[in-house]
Structures are given as structure tokens and as C-alpha cells.
Amino acid sequence: MDHPHIERRGMTDDSIIIAVRAADVVGIAPTLLNFQPEDSLVVVGLQAVFVIAAASAALPEQPGDREKVLTDAKATATALKQAGATTAVMIGYGESEQVSAAASPMADALSAAGVEPLRLVRVENDRIFDLGAPEPSAFRDGARFDPRVTATPVNGRMGLPDHDGIAVQLAPTDGVARAEFSRATEEAGQRLFQQVEQVGRSGGGFVAVTRMLIHEGKSALGRAFESYREGSVLDNAPAAELVVLVNLPPVFNLALQKTTDQAWQIRMWTDLLRRAELEHVPAVAVVLAVCALHAGNGALARAALARALDARPGDPLAQTLIKAIDVGLTPDQLASILSKLPSDS
């Protein structure tokens, strides 16, 4: 069972939600989480009528998962309290027994953390069950709903279909595109090796090589930023050059320092991740994950980090970022961490 997934939101007018009907609560959850929940317990943290944060944890698959359920409940409740939530609405996606097994410990953990659980809503297939509704109530016995109609935009955006939908967006290219980029990557690696050799032959040591790599990295990033900011994409040769360079520590740090929450950067690193050869995936995936975290999109960050760990199991930075997401890392905290990276000068 996965760790709880947490999304934090600022208290702006666009974050206002008045959870009057069960359909209102269910409609906003996918947008808050950036994916359509399945087999999970979602907790929406509120402060008055403001949405403060949303968290998602997988439902228990078997009785032996109870200890993990308790751990997830405590972590979720603590994160929501730290985010400023005073009340919460729980939404269980799945069968009644599984939802109850997760919701009861969650309600206890929320109460213990000082967050009042207001209601529990269960979603199964195309029906909503409002377990906090008074009798008689259509939602009490399960009311039909269409998720395409009830999905509610927040700040002009809608949630992605589900975890699989995000994974598809990050899937590696194949066929001719894969073969062409593989050749471009090999050529880029050879050119970089020749440059390093040339610096060495001219008497330059480690410092000179590092300066050369940073210079090349700045140039490659600059070309990429200009292209994607204008809505274009890089050809294979410059894209492969950047992918190779960003796997080198000084350029990797430089790329991390230049990450933002802008959509064109997320599009850029998504494109490069899909094209990258397996050995170069981890660094590119981490940079994409950091962009996603700047934007408050923990679901995309998780999917990117999953690609990093698939390519390099046990990658320490990817694992550290996943743990940071689990405890509700905020964009401000992320910016503070990145500011402490070694200077590119």
C-alpha cells in the first residue's frame, strides 16, 4: 500500500468550497489531487469554507494492513493539521468494508490531531453514499452520479483521469522516435567526451572541466527554455545534449535551481523524460518532479519519481523526494532547499 499522497493549497478565493452536498465534495476531489482517486480514502482539509489541503491513502487490501492504515492515518492527520485545517471531509472510493476499515482510524487520528471529521462519503462505481446524511436521503442509500458532470474545476483546471493516465503521459517513446533519439544521445555523449578531453589536453584540471560543463549546461538550458517557452520543442540533437548534460552533477544542480511552476517547464521536462534513454531517466525525472512540486502537483511528481526509481531502484534523491511528498512538502519549503544547492558560478 502506498504512502499517503498530500496536496496543499493556498487560502485564496478560488479555493472556496462549500461542502453542502455529497456530489460537491466528490466533484472537487479529483481536481485537488490532480488525478481521479480509486481504491483510496481521500481527506479534504478545510478551514472555514477554504480548502487547505487534500490527502489520499490507499485502502487496505487485507486485514494485515491495519498497522499501515494507522500509520497513514496519523501521517495524514498531522499533515492536514500542520497545513492549517480545522475540519475535514473523508471520501472513500471502494467497497463498504474497505472504506470503513480505513475511515474509522482516520477519523480517530483527525480528532486526536485537532481536526474535526465532518462527514464520510463513499463512492463505488457510479453511486455516491453519504454516510453522514440524515434519513431520509437519496445519498444515504446511494445516488447515481456521472463523474464527468460532477468533476469541479478549481483555478481553471481539472483533475487527470487517474494514476494510470498520468503514467501514460510520462511513458517512454518507442519505435522510430526511440531509435533516432538513441543515436542522437550516443553522438551527444561522444561530443561531450571530446570536449572534456580537449580541456584536459590544454592543461585544465577538474575546475576547468567543471566550468566548461556549467557553460555548456547554461547554453543548453537557455536554448531549451527559449524553445519550449515559445511553444516549440527541441530537435533530437539539442535535446539529447541537454539530457546527457543534466545527468552531470554541476548541470543537474543548475537545472534544479532554474525550475519553476510554469506549465512550459513541466511540458519541457515531460518531453525530455519521454525521450531520454534509460540510463539518463533518473536525473530528468527528478527535475520534472521538482517542477511539479513547485506547481503543487504531487501526483505528477510521484509519477515522475516512479520513473526515476524504475530506471534506478534505490535512487537516494528520488526516495528522499517521495518521503518529502509524504509529509506534505510545500513549494516554499522546496524553494528553500533548492537555494542551498551549490552555486553554479
Image (spheres, rainbow, N blue to C red):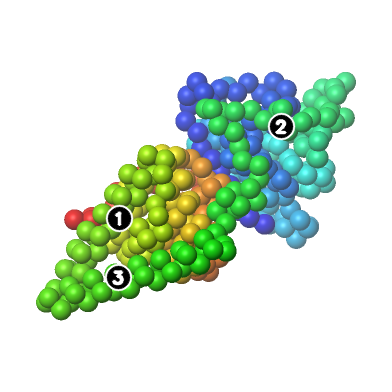
Query: What's the residue type where badge 1 is placed?
Result: Ala
Q: Mark on residue 334?
A: none
For the point 69% across and 20% down, the residue is 20
Callout 3 secondary element: helix
| Cα gap from disc 3 to disc 2, whole angstroms | 50 Å
Residue denoted by label 3: 191
For the point 59% across and 44% down, the residue is 76
Location of the C terminus (image quadrant): bottom left
> Residue 115, how many percent across, how many down?
60, 34
Q: Nearer the viewer, residue 306 or 242?
A: 242
- Image mark count: 3
Residue denoted by label 2: 148
Sequence-first tag of 1 and 2: 2
User: Of circles 1 and 2, which is in front?
Assistant: 1
Callout 2 secondary element: helix
Query: What's the residue type where badge 3 is placed?
Result: Arg
| Cα gap from disc 1 to disc 3, whole angstroms | 14 Å
Location of the N terminus (image quadrant): bottom right
| Cα gap from disc 1 to disc 2, whole angstroms | 42 Å
Residue denoted by label 1: 220
Callout 1 secondary element: helix
